[in-house]
């Protein structure tokens, strides 16, 4: 009976010849030929040596005419070829199964604009290295490095694209679309389109898994971070006044960006699009597999990652280090002192607000003049991204102090009207200045 029963699938055949044909044709049940007669006999215990040799000859065309034993034969490893659907990335062991899948499944009607041209991968049971690891998509070779999450490459953006991002009220979304459209930045994926998990490549080139909602929060932060990085990249090409206005625009975006309607929808579109075509999953998994199994490849990528971190280090230092404060600016930057200026005391000016708008008061214009003194001071002494952000915060706190005094002086309706006037003035000022930032204002190196 054992000469007619498959030891792998346990199927019983009517004749031994059917069994031989089965182990020849079934990729799942092909036997791996070991280097000793005893081991083969343990796999098929009741098949005699002659029958074993016949099976071996039929499978592998081994010349055994000079020896009736295979003890001294070199091990022969049977290879298994896998086929992948270039639309949904499903794996098949037979090409006919792949063809049937393409004809009968939902992939039949999906146009794959990013077809994988080398989708046949040979797996060796003794050596699991992937053959043909350079996959070509639309005649473009996949990048040799995938930038980790938080270290995405933005160097491909030109001046026009960077200014579009920095000036737009949708700059974070535009930046996300442009950055993650590049193959080398495709550092996150959804393992299963039906599950609530996102996997991404971290700064140590390891795969981490987050709940989708938590990852959206990280991505929200990252989309704004792109704008800060782009602004830093343009720091030598933009005036300080322009950078202040751009930072204010980023602050507004950061406070008003709607996670559910903006980032979440964009991420869903990217994931579903890539899942149905050349998946992020397949790209990152192949990259990660090579990292784990090719030491020279891993050493090269770790070294490259160190260079990326070194390059970004100056950005992070600029974003976190500030030396300015309200008192420092008042003592070091102001050309005039509030207490020595006539006709700008709160009680004298705001008692007359019934006569004119707040932006027409001497006190309002005094603070606007001092803002220019502060800008001149930063230009003379140097500044960081953190200095610009702190300057904006200082101005915001001053406005709160002024409004608090107005609230205590006027009735609610009047004070609300003044608040709206100041808010409108600030918004219009940002819009007007952003509109005037153009390629012509870029300072050539």
Image (cartoon, rainbow, N blue to C red):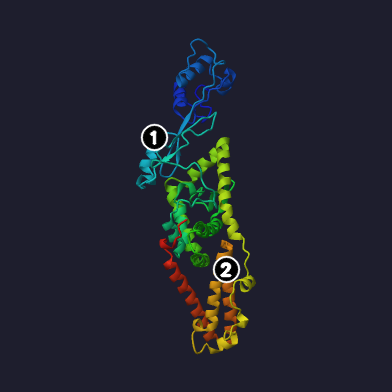
In this rendering, is residue 228 above or below 105? Answer: below
Q: Secondary structure at mark 1?
A: helix
Residue 269: percent from the left, percent from the top?
A: 44, 55
Q: Is residue 415 left or right of residue 98?
A: right
What residue is pinned by disc 2?
Answer: 377
In this rendering, is residue 6 above or below 169? Answer: above
Dot 1: few (<14), some (14–19), or many (≥20) neighbours within 10 Å?
Answer: few
Q: Secondary structure at mark 2?
A: helix
Dot 2: few (<14), some (14–19), or many (≥20) neighbours within 10 Å?
Answer: some
Residue 334: percent from the left, percent from the top?
A: 59, 74
Residue 193: percent from the left, percent from the top?
A: 48, 50
Q: 397 or 86: nearer the eye? A: 397
Q: 109 or 427: nearer the eye? A: 427
Q: Residue at x 52, y 41 (%)?
A: 287
Q: Earlier in the sequence, mark 1 or mark 2?
A: 1
Q: Can you see residue 442?
A: yes
Q: Can you see residue 202?
A: no
The quadrant holding residue 137 is top left
Residue 442: percent from the left, percent from the top?
A: 44, 60
What residue is pinned by disc 1?
Answer: 96
């Amino acid at each position: 009976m054992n000469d007619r029963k498959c030891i792998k699938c346990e199927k019983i055949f009517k004749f031994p010849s059917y069994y031989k044909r089965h182990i020849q044709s079934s990729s799942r049940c092909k036997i791996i030929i070991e280097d000793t007669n005893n081991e083969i006999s343990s796999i098929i215990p009741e098949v005699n040596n002659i029958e074993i040799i016949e099976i071996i000859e039929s499978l592998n065309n081994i010349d055994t005419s000079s020896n009736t034993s295979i003890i001294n034969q070199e091990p022969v490893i049977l290879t298994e070829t896998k086929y992948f659907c270039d639309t949904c990335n499903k794996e098949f062991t037979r090409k006919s199964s792949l063809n049937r899948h393409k004809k009968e499944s939902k992939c039949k009607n999906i146009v794959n604009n990013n077809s994988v041209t080398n989708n046949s991968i040979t797996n060796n049971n003794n050596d699991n290295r992937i053959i043909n690891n350079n996959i070509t998509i639309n005649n473009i070779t996949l990048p040799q490095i995938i930038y980790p999450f938080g270290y995405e490459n933005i160097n491909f953006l030109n001046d026009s694209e960077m200014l579009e991002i920095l000036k737009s009220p949708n700059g974070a979304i535009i930046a996300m679309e442009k950055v993650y459209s590049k193959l080398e930045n495709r550092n996150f994926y959804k393992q299963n389109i039906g599950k609530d998990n996102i996997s991404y490549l971290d700064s140590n080139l390891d795969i981490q898994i987050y709940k989708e909602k938590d990852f959206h929060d990280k991505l929200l932060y990252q989309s704004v971070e792109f704008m800060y990085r782009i602004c830093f990249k343009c720091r030598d090409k933009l005036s300080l006044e322009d950078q202040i206005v751009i930072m204010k625009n980023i602050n507004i975006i950061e406070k008003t960006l709607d996670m559910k309607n903006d980032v979440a929808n964009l991420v869903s579109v990217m994931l579903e699009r890539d899942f149905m075509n050349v998946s992020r999953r397949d790209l990152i998994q192949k990259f990660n597999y090579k990292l784990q199994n090719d030491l020279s490849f891993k050493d090269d990528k770790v070294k490259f990652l160190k260079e990326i971190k070194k390059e970004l280090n100056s950005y992070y230092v600029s974003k976190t280090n500030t030396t300015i404060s309200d008192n420092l600016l008042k003592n070091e930057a102001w050309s005039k002192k509030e207490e020595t200026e006539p006709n700008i005391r709160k009680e004298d000016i705001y008692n007359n607000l019934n006569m004119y708008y707040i932006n027409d008061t001497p006190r309002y214009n005094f603070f606007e003049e001092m803002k220019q003194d502060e800008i001149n001071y930063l230009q003379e002494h140097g500044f960081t991204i953190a200095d610009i952000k702190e300057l904006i915060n200082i101005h915001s706190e001053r406005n709160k102090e002024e409004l608090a005094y107005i609230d205590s002086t006027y009735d609610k309706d009047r004070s609300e009207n003044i608040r709206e006037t100041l808010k409108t003035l600030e918004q219009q000022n940002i819009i007007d200045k952003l509109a005037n930032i153009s390629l012509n204002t870029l300072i050539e190196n």
